[in-house]
């Protein structure tokens, strides 16, 4: 990412917004602001239950920062919004895991059957209790999709697309792994417990062989420092028992100096826990988050920009599928063009044969015509000329036209007399000079008499006789036949 990007840190009490200039390590902050949620609620105390704090906060951020310089964003969420789970699956294929993960997590997530977005990575232990070479355990992180939708919708109002959405404390852990990989002194830290401490939340991540393998979030507002130290030790013991490991974790704490119980937390670890649990490193959270490279996916970093919220372009994500589809498309076009050529050649041969037969028929019918350009059009013109001459001579063509006109009148009369609501189907209509034979079906014998009376009421018909009326057992209808004198 060459251009600046927007970095948001969301927690229960505030939103920290920074415009970050990429390129430097760590990245430099171009401008920043801090929006307290309580100030928003105080300003809109009457409608505090109906406002969306993220939308209102972003409106304030847009007034304080120049968001037009950004087209991408990175969002760090409170770890309390995320559900972290360790799952054991009967296979190790990432493709299969992606397919079945929603079903495995369905009963484990606290979202009341709401849709969620999940990410995961594989865990590998040297001493697998099941005796297999590699363990098929995974660490998952899930969040309600409605939250991701809200972040995307609001930022799109400012033409900004989220590139990464990830848990804050967990992301700081990944930043610490990156930081220690650059230091010869710290690069030997392979198994440790990392604590990310804020005023309202503590995130505990266990790292084994430099791979995050378990996450626990703890509320910081109502917990004593001594209790926190005990919970960390219990988490380590529980992890070792669950995985059959005997890993010794050192402690690394990340918290700013302005944390209210800063000294109490460090003292509690030193008092309650024995070596090697004594905390080794204290770092600033902002420095760790700045270690993350946004131009490529950091290993083990959870990112909820997936599916329709994916940060990769559609073409990049599905390049192989698109390329395969393009090759198949061109192959199909080539086959169709070749097939169309053969079909056209076949049709041309058939047309030539038909033209030959038409020319032969024309010569046989009109032997006096020597020049033949279009046998069909010439024969049509000759037939029309013959018919016109025959009509002029009064040879009976006028009678046919009179009969055709009379049939139309008869059918129109029947249509007007017999109502549409009456069940009446005509199967035969035979007109022979002054007599009309009308056959059809109806639903009962009473309708036969009614139809007879209706037809007799017309002045166009002299007499109507029922030639036959019989029940059709197959269709449960009545067949009738009328003989009508015109």
Image (cartoon, rainbow, N blue to C red):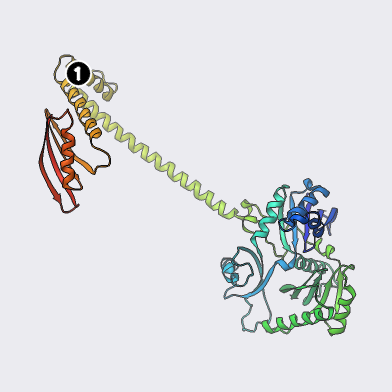
Q: Quadrant of residue 222?
A: bottom right
Q: Position of residue 297 (x, y in %)?
A: 71, 60
The quarter holding residue 16 reads: bottom right
Residue for badge 1 = 386
Residue 121 x, y percent position in the rendering? 66, 69
Q: Is residue 164 left or right of residue 335?
A: right
Q: Is residue 4 visible?
A: no
Horizontal side, residue 462 vs residue 334: left or right? left
Vertical comparison of 257 with 61: above or below? below
Q: Is residue 478 left or right of residue 162?
A: left
Image quarter where the C terminus lies is: top left
**Residue at position x 73%, y 85% from top?**
246
Label 1 neighbour load within 10 Å: few <14, some 14-19, many 20+: few
Is residue 297 shown above or below 207?
above
Above/below status of 370 relative to 330: above
Corner quadrant of residue 294: bottom right
Q: Nearer the viewer, residue 56 or 421?
A: 421
Q: Residue furthest top?
A: 392
Is residue 219 or residue 301 the one in the foreground?
219
Q: Residue at x 23, y 34 (%)?
A: 417
Q: Is residue 344 left or right of residue 421?
A: right
Give coordinates of residue 404: x percent, y percent.
20, 26
């Amino acid at each position: 990412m060459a251009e600046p990007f927007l970095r948001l840190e969301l927690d229960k009490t505030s939103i920290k917004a920074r415009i970050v200039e990429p390129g430097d390590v760590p990245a430099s902050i171009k401008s920043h602001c801090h929006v307290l949620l309580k100030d928003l609620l105080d300003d809109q105390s009457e409608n505090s239950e109906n406002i969306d704090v993220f939308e209102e906060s972003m409106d304030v951020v847009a007034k304080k920062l120049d968001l037009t310089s950004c087209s991408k964003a990175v969002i760090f969420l409170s770890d309390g919004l995320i559900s972290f789970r360790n799952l054991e699956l009967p296979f190790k294929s990432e493709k299969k895991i992606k397919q079945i993960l929603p079903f495995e997590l369905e009963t484990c997530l606290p979202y009341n059957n709401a849709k969620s977005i999940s990410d995961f990575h594989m865990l590998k232990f040297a001493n697998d209790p099941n005796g297999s070479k590699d363990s098929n355990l995974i660490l998952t992180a899930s969040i309600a999709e409605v939250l991701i939708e809200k972040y995307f919708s609001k930022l799109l109002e400012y033409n900004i697309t989220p590139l990464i959405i990830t848990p804050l404390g967990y992301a700081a852990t990944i930043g610490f792994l990156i930081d220690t990989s650059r230091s010869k002194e710290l690069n030997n830290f392979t198994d440790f417990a990392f604590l990310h401490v804020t005023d309202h939340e503590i995130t505990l991540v266990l790292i084994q062989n430099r791979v995050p393998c378990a996450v626990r979030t703890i509320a910081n507002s109502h917990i004593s420092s001594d209790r926190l130290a005990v919970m960390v030790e219990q988490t380590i013991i529980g992890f070792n028992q669950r995985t059959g490991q005997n890993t010794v974790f050192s402690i690394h704490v990340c918290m700013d100096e302005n944390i209210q119980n800063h000294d109490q937390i460090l003292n509690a670890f030193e008092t309650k826990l024995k070596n090697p649990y004594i905390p080794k490193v204290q770092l600033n959270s902002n420095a760790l988050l700045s270690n993350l490279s946004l131009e490529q996916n950091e290993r083990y970093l959870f990112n909820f920009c997936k599916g329709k919220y994916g940060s990769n372009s559609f073409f990049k994500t599905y390049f192989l599928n698109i390329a395969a589809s393009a090759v198949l498309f061109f192959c199909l076009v080539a086959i169709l063009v070749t097939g169309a050529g053969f079909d056209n050649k076949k049709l041309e041969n058939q047309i030539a044969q038909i033209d030959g037969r038409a020319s032969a028929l024309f010569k046989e019918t009109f032997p006096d015509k020597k020049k033949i350009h279009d046998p069909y059009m010439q024969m049509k013109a000759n037939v029309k000329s013959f018919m016109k001459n025959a009509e002029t001579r009064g040879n009976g063509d006028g009678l046919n036209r009179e009969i055709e006109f009379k049939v139309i009148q008869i059918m129109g009369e029947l249509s007007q007399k017999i109502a549409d609501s009456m069940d009446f189907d005509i199967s035969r209509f035979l007109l022979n000079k002054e007599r009309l034979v009308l056959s059809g079906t109806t639903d009962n014998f009473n309708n036969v008499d009614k139809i007879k009376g209706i037809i007799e009421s017309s002045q166009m018909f002299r007499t109507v006789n029922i030639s036959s009326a019989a029940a059709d057992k197959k269709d449960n209808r009545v067949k009738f036949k009328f003989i009508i004198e015109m």
